[in-house]
Structure formats: structure tokens, C-alpha cells
Image (cartoon, rainbow, N blue to C red):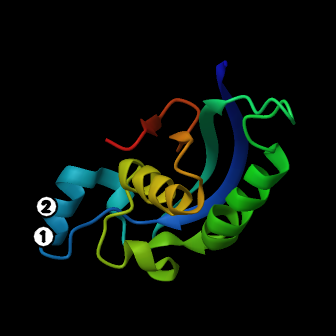
Amino acid sequence: MSRVTVKRKAHFNAAHRLYRADWDTEKNLEVFGKCSYPNYHGHNYDLIVSVTGLIDPETGFVIDLKVLKDLIKAEIEDEFDHKNLNEDVPEFKNLNPTAENICVVIYDKLRKKLDSKFDLEITLYETARNFVTYSGS
């Protein structure tokens, strides 16, 4: 049987601020630059969810892409889109919403809902040139 990776691209817009409450303003600006401005800033995030598994001999699918689409919408897009990540998303109440941390949170949310027979990889584009990938290690 063949192992194949299928990918679904998604998108959400969100605001965030990078800072540590235990640092003063000067230290936050030194480390995080303009991303630490107190009034937040936004990104148009692109997300690629990659699912790897065996092709089902009955359906010819690794996973039904409609099922994956609906899962991404319910768990990620509906929860993150047009939100202030620092203020509106519980996972970031005590976690700095860097691209790296956002990617891990997305992975964890989808991993809980996805059958363990699948491998999962998340790629998150914060900008066209800045992106991170996480596969659960």
C-alpha cells in the first residue's frame, strides 16, 4: 500500500502582540521590535495542513478532504479568524503568540481530532517570506 501526503490550504486574519509581561517596555521592544507595540498588529496567515497516511483501497482517499476542510474550519478558522490572539484565544492567555507557538497550538488542536493512523504536519505562513513548520516532535 502507498503512503501519500494530502494537503489543505486555509487562511485566517488575526492580530497579536509579542511581549513578555515580566519584561519592561524597553526589553520587549529590544527583543520583539515593532511586533511589541502595545496596540497590536495583524497578519494574513496562510496555513497548510498536511496529512500523511495509507490510501484507503475502498475510497482511494488518504482522508476525505471535505472532512479535513471542515475540521480546519471548526478548530482553527472559526477560533482564530478576525481575533486578537492575545485577548480572544484561550491558548494564548499565557503563551506568547509567535508564529512558532501558533503553529504548535494549531497542530495540537488538530492532532486531538485526527485519527492517530495519520501523520500530521502544519506549515504556517505569517508573511509570504516568514513561515514555520511543525510535525509534533
Residue 137 lies left or right of residue 85; in this view the side is left
Q: Residue 40: x and y, percent?
A: 46, 68
Q: Residue 82: x and y, percent?
A: 66, 70
Residue 97 lies left or right of residue 123; in this view the side is left
Looking at the rendered structure, the kind of residue marked 2 is Lys
| In front of the other: 83 or 50 | 50
Name the image quarter holding residue 113: bottom right
| In front of the other: 56 or 121 | 56
Q: Is residue 31 visible?
A: yes
Q: Which mark is residue 23?
A: 1
**Number of numbered discs overlaid on the protein picture:** 2
- Is disc 1 surrounded by few (<14), some (14 to 19) or many (20+) residues within 10 Å? few
The quarter in which the N terminus is drawn is top right
What residue sits 52% from the left and 29% below the top? 129
Q: Check disc 2 and report the residue beneath it.
A: 27
Q: Residue 43: x and y, percent?
A: 57, 53
Name the image quarter holding residue 94: bottom left
Name the image quarter holding residue 49: top right
